Image (cartoon, grey):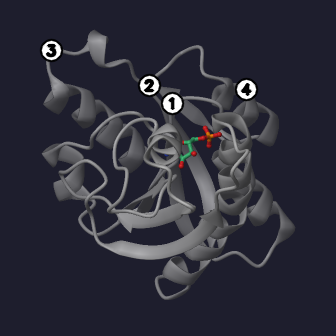
Amino acid sequence: MVRLAIFASGTGSNFEAIVHAEKNGGMPFTCALLVCDQPQAAVLVKADKAGVPSVVFEPKAFDDKAAFEQAIRAALEEHNIEFIALAGYMRLIGPTLLNSYEGKIVNIHPSLLPAFPGLNAVGQALQAGVKVTGVTIHYVDSGMDTGEIIAQQAVPVSDNDTEESLRKKIQAVEHTLYPETLANLLQSCEK
Ligand code: GRF
């Protein structure tokens, strides 16, 4: 079993979907740690309920990003984490973590990258009037949603879609695509 850490800042519906997939069996990973940067985030309650250990690190408690990420790295080492999945983690990963987990950090983004990177990808897609958007899972590099693409799935945009309705459709796709993609990726690393 590959020991996976999930990084999240908010609601945690993807966290929940990945944990759920693990509980259903047959996954080559175990969700061994949640890393969160927001003490009030709903994902912390979900982790508690699921029995997944969590740690909270707030950047403001540290002198700089390197010190912040060194604290996270120490927690990852303590929990023997081998691979990291970002799921609604609202921060760029810096060199401290990128160098320690090279090629072992992935992210999910609610658009067909390279279209609509950054914040509010769903709103950006609606604004642009595209007929198709979707979900991308990619490796994380130092840029904003720029790493190598691993998997994508399209989601059609209807004329009457609102940000809320489109987000719902996208999230439904995310909740199956993320666990499946992690399973495919980690199958080959399983011990
Ligand atoms: C997801 O739509 C994901 O693509 C984006 O942030 C959102 C997180 O949602 N990176 P949740 O916290 O998993 O519900």
Q: Which residue lies under the disc numbered 2?
A: 37
* Residue type, label 2: Asp
**137 or 166, nearer to the observer:** 166
Callout 2: SS: loop
Q: How far apart are marks 1 and 4 (CA)?
A: 12 Å
Q: Can residue 1 be seen in this view?
A: no
Callout 3: SS: loop
- The image shows residue 9, relative to residue 175, as above or below, that is above
Say which quarter of the image contains residue 47.
top right
Q: Which residue lies under the disc numbered 3?
A: 63
- Pair 1/2: label in front: 1
User: Which tag, 4 or 3, sits closer to the chain's start?
Assistant: 4
* Residue type, label 1: Ser
Q: Which disc, if any, is residue 45?
A: 4
Q: Residue at x 40, y 46 (%)?
A: 76
How packed is label 3: few (under 14 Cα within 10 Å), some, or many (20 or more)? few
Q: Which residue lies under the disc numbered 1?
A: 9
Callout 1: SS: loop
Q: Are marks 4 and 3 in contact (CB under 8 Å)?
A: no
